[in-house]
Amino acid sequence: MDDSTLSLVLFSGTDDKLNAAAVLAAGAAAMGRKVNVFLQYWALDAFRKDRIREDHGLASEAGPEGEAAYRRHGGQHWSEIFRQAKEIGDVKIHACSLSMETFGLTLEDLDPLVDDQEGVASFFMDADGPVTFI
């Protein structure tokens, strides 16, 4: 089994992409892999305490048919899947320092799912395998 870290950079803040990232994180955690998630810009904005449960829409390529299918499927909210992933294994969620500064945020503004704030260099120091950008 590959025991390298799953490193995810989340830029998009749409519900479908956040859901996909959460499922990947939970799957990797269930297999015993370490997971590091780096939140930038719109993904970071989706993790704000006051916005995490809001509807963040879907990626434009989903179109009306894709949106209907996504909504029909239902399932757990992406934030709950991330919470479960953190309960299952070693999953860390980091807020990008530059994005925090850009939006004028502090860690207190973010949901407790977010562990800390770090810069790009620190994130890459922990990435011992490929980095996936969502």
Image (cartoon, rainbow, N blue to C red):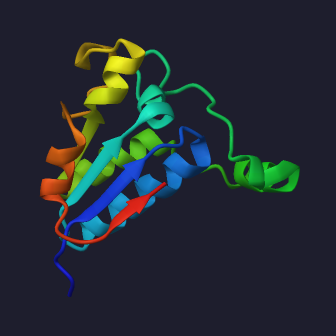
Q: How far from the left and from the top, in percent, is residue 94?
A: 25, 39
Q: Is residue 48 above or below residue 11?
A: above
Q: How far from the left and from the top, in percent, is residue 39?
A: 36, 39
Task: Give the number of callouts.
Answer: 0
The image quarter in which residue 124 lies: bottom left
Looking at this view, name the residue that lies furthest to the bottom.
1
Q: Residue at the location (34% across, 60% down)?
A: 26
Any part of residue 85 in sight: yes
Q: Residue at the location (24% across, 53% down)?
A: 36
Any part of residue 110 in sight: no
Q: Residue at the location (42% across, 53% down)?
A: 22
**Is residue 1 rendered to the left or right of residue 113?**
left
The image quarter in which residue 113 lies: top left
Looking at this view, name the residue that lies furthest to the right.
64
Name the foreground residue: 27 vs 43: 43
Q: Residue at the location (29% across, 34% down)?
A: 96
Q: How far from the left and from the top, in percent, is residue 29?
A: 25, 64
Q: Is residue 29 above or below residue 113?
A: below
Name the foreground residue: 94 vs 114: 94
**Is residue 108 rendered to the left or right of residue 16?**
left
Image quadrant holding the N terminus, namely bottom left
Q: How far from the left and from the top, in percent, is residue 11?
A: 47, 43
